[in-house]
Amino acid sequence: MSTIEIEYCVPCGFLDRALTVEEAICRQFADQLDRISLVMGDHGVFIVRVDDEVVFDKADDPLDVDDIVRRVRPYVVGR
Amino acid sequence: MSTIEIEYCVPCGFLDRALTVEEAICRQFADQLDRISLVMGDHGVFIVRVDDEVVFDKADDPLDVDDIVRRVRPYVVGR
């Protein structure tokens, strides 16, 4: 079972994006998760971590929900 | 700054309710929070905790989003 964190920039208004990513991950993988957390950040941050490992960082890649779900999958499925 | 947990029953299909409560709390109190977590549970659980203190339990009260937000407020505002 895995733990996921979505750290998002509150002043940037990234809440909707964070909720969208969280919902997509929960719909796919809720049975493989212990918890998923929204972590309040700033300075434009949008980072997704699985068990403390960064699987997506908006500083490096465009934000694509399906892409993030694909990146999460190998970490959580089959554990 | 506070930490909130929403523990919800995955097999019951309470994800939508958990996301609705989470979104309402974030829209009101994101600036007062460090993180908010969805915790995967079963057996009909739907419990909201602020800093490990139970502020709502579906076993005791009907689920009303506005009511939950009102219960969260005194724990997080003014800290």
Image (cartoon, coloured by chain):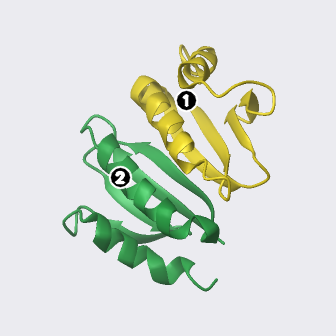
Chain colours: A yellow, B green
Q: Which residue is mark 1?
A: A1
Q: Residues within 10 Å of mark 1 (few under 14, many from 20)?
A: some
Q: Secondary structure at mark 2?
A: helix
Vertical placement of residue A37 versus B64, above or below: above
Q: Chain of mark 2?
A: B
- Residue A39, image x, y percentages: 65, 52
Query: Which residue is at a point 40% across and 28% down the rendered structure image?
Result: A27
Q: Amino acid at mark 2?
A: Thr
Query: Which residue is at a point 47% across and 48% down the rendered structure image?
Result: B38
Q: Chain of mark 1?
A: A
- Residue furthest toward the left? B62
Q: Residues within 10 Å of mark 2 (few under 14, many from 20)?
A: few
Q: Which residue is mark 2?
A: B20
- Residue A61, image x, y percentages: 75, 24
- Residue B53, image x, y percentages: 48, 72
Vertical placement of residue B28 versus A24, above or below: below
Query: Which residue is at a point 62% across and 71% down the rendered structure image?
Result: B32
Query: Which residue is at a point 40% across and 62% down the rendered structure image?
Result: B48
Q: Amino acid at mark 1?
A: Met
> In front here: A31 or B26?
B26
* For residue B41, side relative to residue A13 (left or right): left
Mark 1 → mark 2, Cα distance in angstroms: 24 Å
Q: Quadrant of the N terminus of chain A?
A: top right
Q: Do the residues at discs 1 and 2 belong to one chain?
A: no
Disc 1 versus disc 2: nearer the observer? 2
The mark tally for this picture is 2
